[in-house]
Image (cartoon, helix red, strand yellow):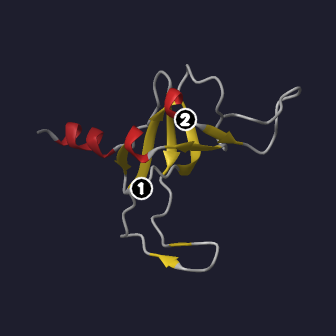
Amino acid sequence: MTAESRQDDDHKLAVRVTADRILCQAPEDGDRRTRSGILIPATATSADRRGLWAAVTEVGPLVRAVEPGDKVLFLPESVIEVDVRGDTFLIVRERDVHAVASQERPAGSTGLYL
């Protein structure tokens, strides 16, 4: 390996999401509390299909209903977890998104995404 090729490896590469993929910041795996205040540790597994909310950081060119800054709801088994320079991100297809939460609603929209 030459010094020039090693130098090229050290440059930062831009990450782009392709097609209908959405790049999300991984949610924290912290403990949860029930409405009555009972603590459920993060290590507890559940048989139910609990969805995850994650903040969108980037969208692919074919994504139509989601924008960076939105939060999306999806099932954990429908994502790919990736590590980009020490940060954990999730990649999910737009068709696997069950709901979208955003600050602004488009004109004429009911705000219901399900």
Residue furthest to the left: 1
Write down the residue under mark 2: 97
Residue 35 rendering spot, x and y as whole percentages:
64, 72
Taking depth in this image into account, of 92 and 58 the one nearest to the observer is 92
Horizontal side of 5 relative to 79 (left or right) equals: left
Q: Which mark is residue 15?
A: none
Write down the residue under mark 1: 87
Q: Residue at x 60, y 80 (%)?
A: 37
Residue furthest to the right: 108
Q: Is residue 36 above or below residue 88?
A: below
SS label for mark 1:
strand
Horizontal side of 86 relative to 40 (left or right) equals: left
Q: Quadrant of the N terminus?
A: top left
SS label for mark 2:
loop
Choose the circle earlier in sequence order: 1 or 2: 1
Residue 26 rendering spot, x and y as whole percentages:
47, 53
The three-letter code of the residue at mark 2 reads: Val
Horizontal side of 41 relative to 8 (left or right) equals: right
